[in-house]
Amino acid sequence: MCGIYAKIESSKVVAREIFPVSHRGPDFFDSRDFIIGDSRLTLAHWRLAIIDLKNESNQPFESTDTGSWIVFNGEIYNYRELRTLISGNFRTKSDTEVLLAAYDKWGVECLKYLRGMFSFIIFDQKKNQLFVARDRFGIKPLYFKSSETSLEVASEIKQLLVMNPQINLTRARDYLFFGAQDHSGETLFQGIQQVRGGQYMLVDCKTPTTPSLRTWYKLQESSGYDGSYEDAQEKFRETFFQSVSLHLQADVPLGFSLSGGLDSTSILCTSGLVSDSSNNPPLSFNATFGDVGLNESALACLAAEKANSLLSFVSPNPQLLEKIMNLTFYHDEPIPNASIISQDAVYKAASDAGIKVMLVGQGGDEVLGGYEDFAYPYIAHLLRQGSFSAALKESLLFKRLCSFSLLGAFKRFFITTAPTRPFLSLYHTFLSSKNSWADSAFFFKDLPFINPWQDFAQRFPLGTFRDQSEFMIQTSSLPKLLHWEDRTSMAHSIESRIPFLDHELVEFCLSLPPSFKFQGGVTKRILRSALCDLLPARVVGRLQKTAFAAPEEKWLRSNGQTLREECIAGARFLPHVFSLRGVELLINNFLSGGSYDPVIWRIFTFSIWVRVFGCR
Protein backbone atom coordinates (compact mmCIF):
# COMPACT_ATOMS: atom_id res chain seq x y z
CA MET A 1 0.00 0.00 0.00
CA CYS A 2 1.28 3.44 -0.90
CA GLY A 3 0.45 7.06 -1.63
CA ILE A 4 0.06 8.36 -5.19
CA TYR A 5 -0.31 11.79 -6.77
CA ALA A 6 -0.54 13.33 -10.25
CA LYS A 7 -1.04 16.87 -11.51
CA ILE A 8 -1.47 18.32 -14.98
CA GLU A 9 -1.16 22.10 -15.30
CA SER A 10 0.34 24.76 -17.52
CA SER A 11 4.10 24.49 -17.78
CA LYS A 12 4.25 28.26 -17.29
CA VAL A 13 2.82 28.01 -13.76
CA VAL A 14 5.31 27.70 -10.91
CA ALA A 15 4.86 24.16 -9.57
CA ARG A 16 3.40 23.97 -6.06
CA GLU A 17 5.27 21.87 -3.54
CA ILE A 18 3.80 18.37 -3.31
CA PHE A 19 2.04 17.72 0.00
CA PRO A 20 3.80 14.77 1.65
CA VAL A 21 1.88 11.66 2.74
CA SER A 22 4.92 9.77 4.01
CA HIS A 23 2.76 7.81 6.47
CA ARG A 24 1.36 5.98 3.42
CA GLY A 25 4.82 5.15 2.11
CA PRO A 26 7.74 5.60 4.51
CA ASP A 27 10.15 3.38 2.58
CA PHE A 28 10.80 5.48 -0.53
CA PHE A 29 9.64 8.67 -2.29
CA ASP A 30 10.21 9.86 -5.83
CA SER A 31 8.54 12.05 -8.44
CA ARG A 32 8.85 12.65 -12.19
CA ASP A 33 7.95 15.67 -14.37
CA PHE A 34 6.98 15.46 -18.04
CA ILE A 35 6.48 18.35 -20.46
CA ILE A 36 3.62 17.70 -22.92
CA GLY A 37 3.10 20.65 -25.25
CA ASP A 38 2.22 23.59 -23.02
CA SER A 39 1.39 21.30 -20.07
CA ARG A 40 3.46 19.82 -17.27
CA LEU A 41 2.60 16.43 -15.76
CA THR A 42 3.91 15.47 -12.32
CA LEU A 43 3.75 11.91 -10.99
CA ALA A 44 4.68 11.20 -7.36
CA HIS A 45 4.77 8.05 -5.23
CA TRP A 46 5.35 7.19 -1.58
CA ARG A 47 6.19 3.50 -1.19
CA LEU A 48 5.33 1.07 1.56
CA ALA A 49 7.30 -1.96 0.36
CA ILE A 50 5.27 -5.20 0.70
CA ILE A 51 6.11 -7.39 -2.33
CA ASP A 52 9.59 -7.44 -3.92
CA LEU A 53 11.37 -5.10 -1.53
CA LYS A 54 14.21 -4.25 -3.94
CA ASN A 55 14.80 -0.71 -5.17
CA GLU A 56 14.15 -1.78 -8.75
CA SER A 57 10.44 -1.92 -7.86
CA ASN A 58 10.28 1.68 -6.63
CA GLN A 59 7.87 4.05 -8.33
CA PRO A 60 7.12 5.98 -10.50
CA PHE A 61 7.82 2.86 -12.56
CA GLU A 62 8.54 2.87 -16.30
CA SER A 63 7.84 0.23 -18.91
CA THR A 64 11.03 -0.21 -20.92
CA ASP A 65 8.92 -1.63 -23.79
CA THR A 66 6.42 1.20 -24.28
CA GLY A 67 7.62 4.14 -22.20
CA SER A 68 4.44 4.13 -20.10
CA TRP A 69 4.73 5.13 -16.44
CA ILE A 70 2.72 4.11 -13.38
CA VAL A 71 2.12 5.13 -9.78
CA PHE A 72 0.13 2.44 -7.99
CA ASN A 73 -1.39 1.87 -4.55
CA GLY A 74 -2.59 -1.59 -3.50
CA GLU A 75 -1.99 -5.23 -4.38
CA ILE A 76 -2.75 -7.34 -7.44
CA TYR A 77 -3.19 -10.73 -5.80
CA ASN A 78 -3.18 -12.72 -9.04
CA TYR A 79 -0.04 -11.02 -10.39
CA ARG A 80 1.85 -14.31 -10.67
CA GLU A 81 -0.90 -15.80 -12.82
CA LEU A 82 -1.01 -12.64 -14.97
CA ARG A 83 2.77 -12.65 -15.31
CA THR A 84 2.56 -16.11 -16.87
CA LEU A 85 -0.37 -15.09 -19.07
CA ILE A 86 1.35 -11.95 -20.37
CA SER A 87 4.82 -13.58 -20.73
CA GLY A 88 7.67 -11.32 -21.80
CA ASN A 89 10.79 -10.15 -20.01
CA PHE A 90 10.20 -8.85 -16.49
CA ARG A 91 13.02 -7.13 -14.63
CA THR A 92 11.37 -7.28 -11.15
CA LYS A 93 9.18 -9.66 -9.15
CA SER A 94 6.68 -6.94 -8.32
CA ASP A 95 2.96 -6.74 -9.05
CA THR A 96 3.55 -3.12 -10.16
CA GLU A 97 5.45 -4.22 -13.25
CA VAL A 98 2.82 -6.87 -14.01
CA LEU A 99 0.03 -4.28 -13.77
CA LEU A 100 1.80 -1.94 -16.16
CA ALA A 101 2.50 -4.82 -18.56
CA ALA A 102 -1.19 -5.77 -18.40
CA TYR A 103 -2.10 -2.24 -19.50
CA ASP A 104 0.47 -2.35 -22.31
CA LYS A 105 -1.08 -5.63 -23.52
CA TRP A 106 -4.82 -5.02 -23.05
CA GLY A 107 -5.25 -1.27 -22.52
CA VAL A 108 -8.25 -0.28 -20.39
CA GLU A 109 -9.53 -3.85 -20.67
CA CYS A 110 -6.73 -4.89 -18.30
CA LEU A 111 -9.05 -4.00 -15.42
CA LYS A 112 -11.19 -7.08 -15.87
CA TYR A 113 -8.13 -9.33 -15.44
CA LEU A 114 -7.18 -7.88 -12.05
CA ARG A 115 -7.96 -9.62 -8.78
CA GLY A 116 -7.06 -7.31 -5.96
CA MET A 117 -7.35 -3.88 -4.39
CA PHE A 118 -5.91 -0.91 -6.21
CA SER A 119 -5.92 2.68 -7.29
CA PHE A 120 -3.44 3.71 -9.96
CA ILE A 121 -2.46 6.37 -12.48
CA ILE A 122 -0.83 5.28 -15.75
CA PHE A 123 0.76 7.83 -18.09
CA ASP A 124 0.66 6.55 -21.67
CA GLN A 125 3.35 8.60 -23.43
CA LYS A 126 2.33 7.41 -26.89
CA LYS A 127 -1.21 8.75 -26.42
CA ASN A 128 -0.27 11.60 -24.04
CA GLN A 129 -3.05 10.26 -21.86
CA LEU A 130 -3.63 9.45 -18.18
CA PHE A 131 -5.51 6.28 -17.27
CA VAL A 132 -6.84 6.62 -13.70
CA ALA A 133 -8.71 3.72 -12.07
CA ARG A 134 -9.98 2.33 -8.76
CA ASP A 135 -10.73 -1.24 -7.73
CA ARG A 136 -14.19 -2.81 -7.86
CA PHE A 137 -15.35 -1.98 -4.34
CA GLY A 138 -13.22 1.07 -3.57
CA ILE A 139 -10.88 -0.57 -1.07
CA LYS A 140 -8.07 1.80 -2.05
CA PRO A 141 -8.87 5.55 -2.09
CA LEU A 142 -8.66 7.92 -5.05
CA TYR A 143 -9.65 11.61 -5.19
CA PHE A 144 -9.45 14.36 -7.78
CA LYS A 145 -9.89 18.09 -8.22
CA SER A 146 -10.27 19.64 -11.64
CA SER A 147 -10.65 22.96 -13.41
CA GLU A 148 -10.62 24.08 -17.03
CA THR A 149 -6.81 24.19 -17.04
CA SER A 150 -5.61 21.65 -14.46
CA LEU A 151 -6.28 18.30 -12.84
CA GLU A 152 -4.97 16.79 -9.62
CA VAL A 153 -5.41 13.14 -8.53
CA ALA A 154 -4.36 11.79 -5.13
CA SER A 155 -4.71 9.07 -2.52
CA GLU A 156 -5.89 11.46 0.18
CA ILE A 157 -7.97 14.62 0.21
CA LYS A 158 -5.35 16.62 2.14
CA GLN A 159 -3.04 16.40 -0.89
CA LEU A 160 -5.54 18.49 -2.86
CA LEU A 161 -6.44 21.16 -0.30
CA VAL A 162 -5.76 24.87 -0.39
CA MET A 163 -5.93 27.30 2.53
CA ASN A 164 -9.35 27.63 4.19
CA PRO A 165 -11.21 25.08 2.07
CA GLN A 166 -14.95 25.49 1.60
CA ILE A 167 -17.42 23.08 3.19
CA ASN A 168 -19.80 21.10 0.97
CA LEU A 169 -22.98 21.89 2.93
CA THR A 170 -25.05 19.13 1.36
CA ARG A 171 -22.56 16.47 2.45
CA ALA A 172 -22.22 18.19 5.84
CA ARG A 173 -25.96 17.86 6.35
CA ASP A 174 -25.82 14.17 5.37
CA TYR A 175 -23.13 13.59 7.99
CA LEU A 176 -24.69 15.56 10.83
CA PHE A 177 -28.25 14.31 10.44
CA PHE A 178 -27.74 10.78 9.20
CA GLY A 179 -24.10 9.88 9.93
CA ALA A 180 -23.66 9.34 6.18
CA GLN A 181 -20.14 9.32 4.74
CA ASP A 182 -18.62 8.18 1.43
CA HIS A 183 -22.09 7.50 0.00
CA SER A 184 -21.53 9.91 -2.87
CA GLY A 185 -18.88 10.94 -5.37
CA GLU A 186 -18.75 14.26 -3.53
CA THR A 187 -16.75 14.83 -0.35
CA LEU A 188 -17.16 17.21 2.56
CA PHE A 189 -14.80 19.60 0.77
CA GLN A 190 -16.37 21.68 -1.99
CA GLY A 191 -14.80 20.88 -5.37
CA ILE A 192 -13.05 17.66 -4.36
CA GLN A 193 -14.55 14.41 -5.63
CA GLN A 194 -13.69 10.76 -5.39
CA VAL A 195 -13.39 8.15 -8.08
CA ARG A 196 -15.91 5.59 -6.81
CA GLY A 197 -15.26 1.87 -6.67
CA GLY A 198 -15.43 0.34 -10.15
CA GLN A 199 -14.81 3.64 -11.95
CA TYR A 200 -12.02 4.98 -14.17
CA MET A 201 -11.26 8.04 -16.26
CA LEU A 202 -9.12 8.85 -19.30
CA VAL A 203 -7.51 12.29 -19.40
CA ASP A 204 -5.89 14.06 -22.34
CA CYS A 205 -2.71 15.56 -20.87
CA LYS A 206 -2.73 18.43 -23.37
CA THR A 207 -6.27 19.55 -22.49
CA PRO A 208 -7.07 18.40 -18.92
CA THR A 209 -10.65 19.62 -18.83
CA THR A 210 -13.10 18.28 -16.27
CA PRO A 211 -12.71 14.50 -16.62
CA SER A 212 -15.56 12.13 -17.38
CA LEU A 213 -15.93 9.19 -15.00
CA ARG A 214 -16.77 5.85 -16.55
CA THR A 215 -17.93 2.65 -14.87
CA TRP A 216 -15.90 -0.49 -15.55
CA TYR A 217 -17.42 -2.81 -12.93
CA LYS A 218 -20.94 -3.42 -11.68
CA LEU A 219 -22.39 -6.19 -9.56
CA GLN A 220 -24.26 -7.96 -12.33
CA GLU A 221 -27.65 -9.50 -11.67
CA SER A 222 -27.25 -13.26 -12.16
CA SER A 223 -29.78 -16.02 -12.66
CA GLY A 224 -29.00 -17.17 -9.15
CA TYR A 225 -27.40 -20.26 -7.71
CA ASP A 226 -29.51 -23.35 -8.37
CA GLY A 227 -27.43 -26.01 -6.62
CA SER A 228 -27.99 -27.64 -3.23
CA TYR A 229 -27.07 -26.06 0.09
CA GLU A 230 -24.41 -28.74 0.61
CA ASP A 231 -22.80 -27.96 -2.75
CA ALA A 232 -22.91 -24.25 -1.95
CA GLN A 233 -21.08 -24.90 1.32
CA GLU A 234 -18.28 -26.65 -0.55
CA LYS A 235 -18.06 -23.89 -3.15
CA PHE A 236 -18.03 -21.20 -0.46
CA ARG A 237 -15.29 -22.99 1.47
CA GLU A 238 -13.16 -23.42 -1.66
CA THR A 239 -13.54 -19.77 -2.74
CA PHE A 240 -12.97 -18.40 0.76
CA PHE A 241 -9.85 -20.53 1.22
CA GLN A 242 -8.52 -19.27 -2.10
CA SER A 243 -9.19 -15.66 -1.16
CA VAL A 244 -7.45 -15.94 2.21
CA SER A 245 -4.49 -17.68 0.57
CA LEU A 246 -4.11 -14.88 -1.99
CA HIS A 247 -4.32 -12.24 0.75
CA LEU A 248 -1.45 -13.86 2.67
CA GLN A 249 1.15 -13.05 -0.03
CA ALA A 250 3.75 -10.71 1.46
CA ASP A 251 7.50 -10.31 1.88
CA VAL A 252 7.04 -8.55 5.25
CA PRO A 253 5.58 -9.52 8.66
CA LEU A 254 1.81 -10.09 8.62
CA GLY A 255 -0.80 -10.08 11.40
CA PHE A 256 -4.55 -10.28 12.06
CA SER A 257 -7.13 -7.93 13.53
CA LEU A 258 -9.18 -10.20 15.79
CA SER A 259 -12.41 -8.79 17.23
CA GLY A 260 -13.64 -12.15 18.47
CA GLY A 261 -16.48 -12.07 15.96
CA LEU A 262 -17.29 -14.59 13.26
CA ASP A 263 -15.62 -12.83 10.31
CA SER A 264 -12.18 -12.08 11.76
CA THR A 265 -12.10 -15.50 13.45
CA SER A 266 -12.87 -17.21 10.12
CA ILE A 267 -9.95 -15.46 8.44
CA LEU A 268 -7.48 -16.25 11.23
CA CYS A 269 -8.48 -19.91 11.56
CA THR A 270 -8.44 -20.44 7.79
CA SER A 271 -5.02 -18.84 7.36
CA GLY A 272 -3.24 -21.67 9.15
CA LEU A 273 -4.58 -24.20 6.63
CA VAL A 274 -3.71 -22.27 3.47
CA SER A 275 -0.49 -20.52 4.46
CA ASP A 276 2.83 -21.71 3.06
CA SER A 277 4.85 -19.48 5.39
CA SER A 278 7.04 -20.50 8.30
CA ASN A 279 5.76 -22.27 11.37
CA ASN A 280 5.91 -19.12 13.52
CA PRO A 281 2.57 -18.57 15.30
CA PRO A 282 0.55 -15.79 13.63
CA LEU A 283 0.18 -12.56 15.60
CA SER A 284 -3.31 -11.21 16.30
CA PHE A 285 -4.55 -8.06 18.04
CA ASN A 286 -7.73 -7.20 19.93
CA ALA A 287 -9.15 -4.04 21.53
CA THR A 288 -10.84 -4.70 24.85
CA PHE A 289 -12.79 -2.62 27.39
CA GLY A 290 -14.07 -3.08 30.90
CA ASP A 291 -17.62 -2.53 29.66
CA VAL A 292 -19.19 -5.99 29.60
CA GLY A 293 -21.35 -5.22 26.56
CA LEU A 294 -18.28 -4.27 24.49
CA ASN A 295 -15.81 -6.86 25.71
CA GLU A 296 -15.27 -9.82 23.37
CA SER A 297 -11.85 -10.75 24.70
CA ALA A 298 -13.02 -14.20 25.81
CA LEU A 299 -14.13 -15.08 22.27
CA ALA A 300 -10.92 -13.62 20.85
CA CYS A 301 -8.93 -15.87 23.21
CA LEU A 302 -10.85 -18.92 22.00
CA ALA A 303 -10.17 -17.99 18.38
CA ALA A 304 -6.47 -17.38 19.01
CA GLU A 305 -6.14 -20.70 20.83
CA LYS A 306 -7.89 -22.54 17.99
CA ALA A 307 -5.54 -20.95 15.42
CA ASN A 308 -2.42 -21.24 17.58
CA SER A 309 -2.05 -17.46 17.41
CA LEU A 310 -0.20 -15.13 19.77
CA LEU A 311 -2.89 -12.65 20.84
CA SER A 312 -2.14 -9.14 22.12
CA PHE A 313 -4.72 -6.97 23.86
CA VAL A 314 -4.96 -3.18 23.84
CA SER A 315 -7.26 -1.11 26.07
CA PRO A 316 -7.83 2.33 24.53
CA ASN A 317 -8.19 5.11 27.10
CA PRO A 318 -7.47 8.20 25.05
CA GLN A 319 -6.97 11.86 25.70
CA LEU A 320 -10.09 12.38 23.66
CA LEU A 321 -9.51 15.79 22.04
CA GLU A 322 -5.88 15.10 21.18
CA LYS A 323 -6.72 11.68 19.73
CA ILE A 324 -9.64 12.89 17.63
CA MET A 325 -7.64 15.81 16.26
CA ASN A 326 -4.84 13.42 15.29
CA LEU A 327 -7.21 10.95 13.64
CA THR A 328 -9.10 13.73 11.86
CA PHE A 329 -5.88 14.78 10.14
CA TYR A 330 -5.31 11.26 8.84
CA HIS A 331 -8.96 10.64 7.90
CA ASP A 332 -9.50 14.04 6.22
CA GLU A 333 -13.13 14.01 7.38
CA PRO A 334 -14.85 13.92 10.81
CA ILE A 335 -14.40 10.80 12.96
CA PRO A 336 -17.96 9.41 12.91
CA ASN A 337 -17.82 7.18 15.99
CA ALA A 338 -15.47 6.05 18.73
CA SER A 339 -14.85 2.61 17.22
CA ILE A 340 -12.13 4.21 15.08
CA ILE A 341 -10.21 5.00 18.28
CA SER A 342 -10.28 1.28 19.10
CA GLN A 343 -9.20 0.46 15.56
CA ASP A 344 -6.35 2.96 15.86
CA ALA A 345 -5.13 1.34 19.08
CA VAL A 346 -5.05 -2.07 17.38
CA TYR A 347 -2.98 -0.76 14.48
CA LYS A 348 -0.57 1.05 16.80
CA ALA A 349 0.03 -2.19 18.73
CA ALA A 350 0.56 -4.05 15.44
CA SER A 351 3.01 -1.41 14.22
CA ASP A 352 4.93 -1.55 17.49
CA ALA A 353 5.21 -5.32 16.97
CA GLY A 354 6.76 -4.82 13.51
CA ILE A 355 3.67 -5.80 11.50
CA LYS A 356 3.37 -4.33 7.99
CA VAL A 357 0.25 -6.14 6.71
CA MET A 358 -3.00 -6.89 8.58
CA LEU A 359 -5.90 -9.09 7.49
CA VAL A 360 -9.28 -7.79 8.66
CA GLY A 361 -12.91 -8.97 8.58
CA GLN A 362 -14.59 -6.00 6.87
CA GLY A 363 -17.20 -6.83 4.24
CA GLY A 364 -18.51 -10.08 5.69
CA ASP A 365 -21.71 -8.51 7.04
CA GLU A 366 -22.58 -6.71 3.81
CA VAL A 367 -21.85 -9.72 1.60
CA LEU A 368 -23.42 -12.42 3.80
CA GLY A 369 -26.30 -10.61 5.48
CA GLY A 370 -24.84 -10.08 8.92
CA TYR A 371 -26.81 -6.99 9.96
CA GLU A 372 -30.30 -6.96 11.42
CA ASP A 373 -31.33 -4.73 8.49
CA PHE A 374 -31.39 -7.90 6.40
CA ALA A 375 -34.31 -9.23 8.43
CA TYR A 376 -36.65 -6.79 6.67
CA PRO A 377 -36.00 -7.86 3.06
CA TYR A 378 -35.86 -11.50 4.15
CA ILE A 379 -39.31 -11.35 5.76
CA ALA A 380 -40.58 -9.46 2.70
CA HIS A 381 -39.12 -12.22 0.50
CA LEU A 382 -41.10 -14.84 2.42
CA LEU A 383 -44.29 -12.78 2.20
CA ARG A 384 -43.90 -12.34 -1.56
CA GLN A 385 -43.60 -16.13 -1.81
CA GLY A 386 -46.84 -16.50 0.15
CA SER A 387 -45.03 -18.15 3.08
CA PHE A 388 -46.97 -16.28 5.77
CA SER A 389 -46.40 -18.78 8.57
CA ALA A 390 -42.66 -18.87 7.83
CA ALA A 391 -42.57 -15.05 7.81
CA LEU A 392 -44.25 -14.93 11.24
CA LYS A 393 -41.91 -17.60 12.62
CA GLU A 394 -38.80 -15.83 11.34
CA SER A 395 -40.08 -12.48 12.70
CA LEU A 396 -40.41 -13.96 16.18
CA LEU A 397 -36.94 -15.55 15.98
CA PHE A 398 -35.25 -12.33 14.86
CA LYS A 399 -37.13 -10.29 17.45
CA ARG A 400 -35.44 -12.39 20.16
CA LEU A 401 -32.00 -11.63 18.74
CA CYS A 402 -32.22 -7.98 17.74
CA SER A 403 -34.49 -4.96 17.61
CA PHE A 404 -36.48 -6.21 14.61
CA SER A 405 -40.15 -5.19 14.64
CA LEU A 406 -42.93 -4.83 12.12
CA LEU A 407 -43.35 -1.22 13.23
CA GLY A 408 -39.65 -0.66 12.53
CA ALA A 409 -40.07 -2.28 9.12
CA PHE A 410 -42.90 0.12 8.27
CA LYS A 411 -40.93 3.13 9.52
CA ARG A 412 -37.90 2.11 7.45
CA PHE A 413 -40.07 1.60 4.38
CA PHE A 414 -41.71 5.00 4.81
CA ILE A 415 -38.43 6.89 5.22
CA THR A 416 -36.76 5.33 2.19
CA THR A 417 -39.74 5.38 -0.18
CA ALA A 418 -41.83 8.45 0.67
CA PRO A 419 -42.39 9.61 -2.93
CA THR A 420 -44.05 12.99 -2.67
CA ARG A 421 -43.18 16.39 -1.33
CA PRO A 422 -46.05 16.45 1.24
CA PHE A 423 -44.81 13.21 2.80
CA LEU A 424 -41.24 14.52 2.83
CA SER A 425 -42.42 17.75 4.41
CA LEU A 426 -44.07 15.81 7.22
CA TYR A 427 -40.85 13.83 7.68
CA HIS A 428 -38.84 17.07 7.74
CA THR A 429 -41.15 18.57 10.34
CA PHE A 430 -40.58 15.53 12.55
CA LEU A 431 -36.82 15.66 12.10
CA SER A 432 -36.45 19.40 12.58
CA SER A 433 -38.40 19.24 15.86
CA LYS A 434 -36.05 16.48 16.98
CA ASN A 435 -32.91 18.31 15.80
CA SER A 436 -33.25 21.81 17.20
CA TRP A 437 -29.43 22.09 17.20
CA ALA A 438 -29.47 22.77 13.43
CA ASP A 439 -30.06 26.09 11.71
CA SER A 440 -33.46 25.80 10.01
CA ALA A 441 -32.27 27.19 6.66
CA PHE A 442 -29.41 24.67 6.60
CA PHE A 443 -31.84 21.88 7.40
CA PHE A 444 -34.36 22.69 4.69
CA LYS A 445 -31.83 23.34 1.91
CA ASP A 446 -32.63 21.22 -1.21
CA LEU A 447 -35.82 19.92 0.42
CA PRO A 448 -36.59 16.98 -1.95
CA PHE A 449 -33.18 15.37 -1.40
CA ILE A 450 -32.79 15.61 2.33
CA ASN A 451 -32.61 11.86 2.93
CA PRO A 452 -29.42 10.42 1.38
CA TRP A 453 -30.84 6.88 1.64
CA GLN A 454 -33.82 7.69 -0.57
CA ASP A 455 -31.59 6.57 -3.42
CA PHE A 456 -32.14 2.98 -2.23
CA ALA A 457 -35.83 3.11 -3.12
CA GLN A 458 -35.13 4.63 -6.53
CA ARG A 459 -32.46 2.09 -7.47
CA PHE A 460 -34.05 -0.96 -5.83
CA PRO A 461 -37.85 -0.59 -5.85
CA LEU A 462 -38.45 -4.16 -4.64
CA GLY A 463 -35.93 -3.95 -1.80
CA THR A 464 -34.88 -7.62 -2.03
CA PHE A 465 -32.22 -9.32 0.07
CA ARG A 466 -29.70 -8.97 -2.75
CA ASP A 467 -30.70 -5.33 -3.21
CA GLN A 468 -29.91 -4.71 0.44
CA SER A 469 -26.47 -6.28 0.01
CA GLU A 470 -25.71 -4.27 -3.13
CA PHE A 471 -26.78 -1.00 -1.53
CA MET A 472 -24.65 -1.65 1.55
CA ILE A 473 -21.65 -2.72 -0.55
CA GLN A 474 -21.85 0.21 -2.96
CA THR A 475 -23.37 3.08 -0.97
CA SER A 476 -24.54 3.04 2.62
CA SER A 477 -22.20 0.90 4.72
CA LEU A 478 -19.07 -0.52 3.12
CA PRO A 479 -17.60 2.62 1.46
CA LYS A 480 -17.30 4.45 4.78
CA LEU A 481 -15.94 1.35 6.54
CA LEU A 482 -13.27 1.04 3.86
CA HIS A 483 -12.42 4.73 4.27
CA TRP A 484 -11.92 4.24 8.02
CA GLU A 485 -9.94 1.04 7.49
CA ASP A 486 -7.56 2.57 4.98
CA ARG A 487 -6.86 5.82 6.84
CA THR A 488 -6.49 4.24 10.27
CA SER A 489 -4.12 1.52 9.07
CA MET A 490 -2.07 3.90 6.93
CA ALA A 491 -1.67 6.32 9.85
CA HIS A 492 0.62 3.57 11.20
CA SER A 493 2.09 2.62 7.79
CA ILE A 494 0.27 -0.73 7.74
CA GLU A 495 -1.49 -2.26 4.73
CA SER A 496 -4.91 -3.67 5.61
CA ARG A 497 -6.31 -6.48 3.47
CA ILE A 498 -9.91 -7.65 3.21
CA PRO A 499 -10.42 -11.28 2.11
CA PHE A 500 -14.24 -11.03 2.20
CA LEU A 501 -14.06 -8.52 -0.68
CA ASP A 502 -12.41 -10.80 -3.21
CA HIS A 503 -14.76 -10.16 -6.13
CA GLU A 504 -15.16 -13.85 -7.00
CA LEU A 505 -16.27 -14.54 -3.41
CA VAL A 506 -18.63 -11.54 -3.39
CA GLU A 507 -20.25 -12.49 -6.69
CA PHE A 508 -20.76 -16.09 -5.56
CA CYS A 509 -22.31 -15.05 -2.24
CA LEU A 510 -24.70 -12.59 -3.90
CA SER A 511 -25.91 -15.33 -6.24
CA LEU A 512 -27.09 -17.49 -3.33
CA PRO A 513 -30.74 -17.67 -2.22
CA PRO A 514 -31.52 -15.58 0.89
CA SER A 515 -32.21 -18.71 2.95
CA PHE A 516 -28.60 -19.89 2.44
CA LYS A 517 -27.43 -16.80 4.31
CA PHE A 518 -30.29 -15.87 6.63
CA GLN A 519 -32.71 -18.37 8.15
CA GLY A 520 -34.10 -19.54 11.47
CA GLY A 521 -32.85 -16.44 13.25
CA VAL A 522 -29.32 -17.24 12.05
CA THR A 523 -27.29 -14.70 10.07
CA LYS A 524 -24.37 -15.58 7.77
CA ARG A 525 -25.64 -19.15 7.82
CA ILE A 526 -23.43 -20.51 5.03
CA LEU A 527 -20.25 -19.13 6.62
CA ARG A 528 -21.10 -20.78 9.95
CA SER A 529 -21.86 -24.18 8.42
CA ALA A 530 -19.05 -24.19 5.83
CA LEU A 531 -16.31 -23.45 8.41
CA CYS A 532 -17.84 -24.90 11.58
CA ASP A 533 -15.09 -27.54 11.85
CA LEU A 534 -12.40 -24.82 11.92
CA LEU A 535 -13.92 -22.33 14.37
CA PRO A 536 -14.59 -22.36 18.12
CA ALA A 537 -18.13 -23.60 18.78
CA ARG A 538 -18.97 -20.53 20.87
CA VAL A 539 -18.07 -18.23 18.01
CA VAL A 540 -20.14 -20.23 15.52
CA GLY A 541 -23.11 -20.44 17.87
CA ARG A 542 -23.11 -16.80 18.95
CA LEU A 543 -25.96 -15.13 17.10
CA GLN A 544 -26.08 -11.65 18.63
CA LYS A 545 -23.83 -9.21 16.80
CA THR A 546 -21.53 -6.79 18.63
CA ALA A 547 -19.96 -4.17 16.40
CA PHE A 548 -16.29 -3.23 16.68
CA ALA A 549 -17.34 -0.67 19.28
CA ALA A 550 -16.05 1.63 22.01
CA PRO A 551 -17.55 3.27 25.12
CA GLU A 552 -18.43 6.44 23.23
CA GLU A 553 -20.95 7.86 25.70
CA LYS A 554 -18.68 7.18 28.68
CA TRP A 555 -15.73 8.95 27.04
CA LEU A 556 -17.84 12.01 26.22
CA ARG A 557 -19.25 12.31 29.73
CA SER A 558 -15.77 12.08 31.23
CA ASN A 559 -14.57 14.82 28.84
CA GLY A 560 -17.56 17.11 29.41
CA GLN A 561 -15.72 20.43 29.43
CA THR A 562 -13.91 19.63 26.19
CA LEU A 563 -17.17 18.47 24.61
CA ARG A 564 -18.98 21.68 25.56
CA GLU A 565 -16.16 23.98 24.44
CA GLU A 566 -15.68 22.34 21.05
CA CYS A 567 -19.37 22.09 20.19
CA ILE A 568 -20.14 25.68 21.19
CA ALA A 569 -17.06 26.96 19.33
CA GLY A 570 -18.23 25.10 16.24
CA ALA A 571 -21.75 26.52 16.55
CA ARG A 572 -20.41 30.06 16.84
CA PHE A 573 -18.05 29.65 13.90
CA LEU A 574 -20.74 28.10 11.66
CA PRO A 575 -24.01 29.95 12.39
CA HIS A 576 -25.29 28.94 8.95
CA VAL A 577 -25.11 25.29 10.06
CA PHE A 578 -25.84 25.29 13.80
CA SER A 579 -28.28 26.95 16.16
CA LEU A 580 -26.06 28.06 19.05
CA ARG A 581 -28.95 27.95 21.51
CA GLY A 582 -29.98 24.50 20.32
CA VAL A 583 -26.43 23.11 20.62
CA GLU A 584 -26.07 24.53 24.14
CA LEU A 585 -29.34 22.93 25.26
CA LEU A 586 -28.41 19.55 23.72
CA ILE A 587 -24.97 19.40 25.35
CA ASN A 588 -26.10 20.76 28.73
CA ASN A 589 -28.95 18.25 28.90
CA PHE A 590 -26.57 15.37 28.11
CA LEU A 591 -23.94 16.45 30.66
CA SER A 592 -26.67 16.88 33.29
CA GLY A 593 -27.52 13.18 33.01
CA GLY A 594 -29.85 13.24 30.02
CA SER A 595 -29.98 10.51 27.42
CA TYR A 596 -27.26 10.14 24.80
CA ASP A 597 -27.89 10.88 21.14
CA PRO A 598 -25.14 9.94 18.62
CA VAL A 599 -25.61 13.34 16.99
CA ILE A 600 -23.68 14.76 19.96
CA TRP A 601 -20.59 12.88 18.82
CA ARG A 602 -21.11 14.05 15.25
CA ILE A 603 -21.41 17.72 16.24
CA PHE A 604 -18.29 17.33 18.41
CA THR A 605 -16.18 15.71 15.69
CA PHE A 606 -17.52 17.98 12.92
CA SER A 607 -16.47 21.02 14.95
CA ILE A 608 -12.99 19.53 15.43
CA TRP A 609 -12.75 18.76 11.70
CA VAL A 610 -13.56 22.38 10.82
CA ARG A 611 -10.77 23.54 13.15
CA VAL A 612 -8.16 21.01 11.97
CA PHE A 613 -8.52 21.93 8.29
CA GLY A 614 -9.49 25.59 8.68
CA CYS A 615 -12.75 25.03 6.80
CA ARG A 616 -15.24 27.78 6.14
Image: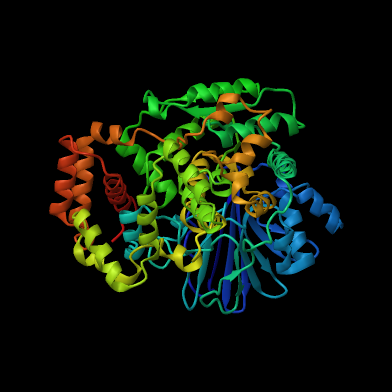
Percent across and percent down for residue 29 are 59, 49
Percent across and percent down for residue 162 are 39, 62
Q: Is residue 335 left or right of residue 129?
A: left
Residue at (32%, 32%) from the top-left corner?
319
Q: Is residue 388 left or right of residue 444?
A: right
Quadrant in the picture for the C terminus: bottom left
Between 603 and 487, the one lying in front of the other is 603
Percent across and percent down for residue 350 are 54, 31
Quarter occupied by residue 126 = bottom right
Between 232 and 396, the one lying in front of the other is 396
Q: How is the image coloured?
A: rainbow
Percent across and percent down for residue 563 are 23, 41
Regarding residue 352, the answer to whether it shows in the image is: no
Residue at (68%, 32%) from the top-left corner?
270
State whether residue 609 is above or below residue 70.
Answer: above
Regarding residue 184, the answer to whether it shows in the image is: yes
Residue at (60%, 45%) from the top-left corner?
517
State whether residue 273 is above or below residue 390.
Answer: above
Q: Is residue 125 left or right of residue 496?
A: right
